[in-house]
Image (cartoon, rainbow, N blue to C red):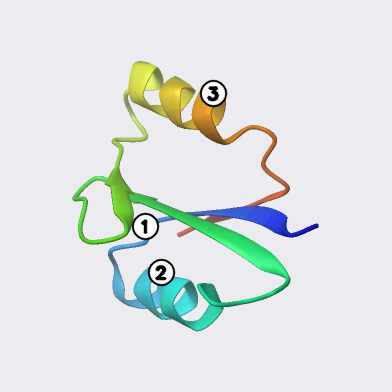
């Protein structure tokens, strides 16, 4: 079973590199969020609890969070 990995700041340079490198991984299922959504990255402002709560409800359980 793949581990679910949530990457915050996925639209940034490092986040984009991680998402791109791991998106076809057989070990990880990658989910990216950022305050400015782009292709394959969900828009979520981490300072807004309601938005963050929605992400966690939809993706639970998350195995790993990489916060950038």
Nearest the viewer among 25 and 6 is 25
Q: Quadrant of the N terminus?
A: bottom right
Please determine whether, in this image, residue 45 is positioned above or below residue 18: above
Q: Are marks 2 and 3 in contact (CB under 8 Å)?
A: no
Q: Most extreme residue toward the right, as rendered? A: 1
Q: Secondary structure at mark 2?
A: helix
- Residue shown at 35% from the left, 25% from the top: 51
Residue 28: quadrant of the picture: bottom right
As drawn, the label of residue 15 is 2
Q: What residue is pinned by disc 1? A: 9
Distance between the alpha carbons at the discs numbered 2 and 3: 22 Å
Badge 3 element: helix
State the residue in front, 67 or 32: 32
Which residue is the site of mark 3?
A: 57
Q: Can you tell which of label 1 and label 3 is closer to the viewer? A: 3
Q: Is residue 56 above or below residue 68?
A: above
Q: Residue at x 36, y 16 (%)?
A: 50
Question: Does dot 1 land on a helix, a strand or a loop?
Answer: loop
Residue 22, placed above or below residue 61: below
- What separation in Å lies between label 1 and label 2 (alpha carbons)? 6 Å
Q: Looking at the image, do the residues carrying marks 1 and 2 touch, with CB atoms under 8 Å apart?
A: yes
Horizontal relation, residue 19 to residue 46: left or right: right
Q: Residue at x 41, y 69 (%)?
A: 15
- Disc 2 crowd rating (10 Å Cα; few below 14, some 14-19, many 20+) is many
């Amino acid at each position: 079973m793949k581990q679910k990995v949530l990457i915050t700041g996925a639209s940034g340079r490092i986040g984009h590199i991680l998402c791109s490198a791991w998106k076809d991984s057989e070990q990880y299922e990658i989910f990216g969020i950022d305050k400015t959504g782009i292709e394959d990255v969900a828009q979520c402002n981490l300072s807004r609890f309601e938005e963050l709560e929605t992400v966690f409800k939809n993706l639970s359980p998350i195995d790993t969070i990489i916060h950038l």
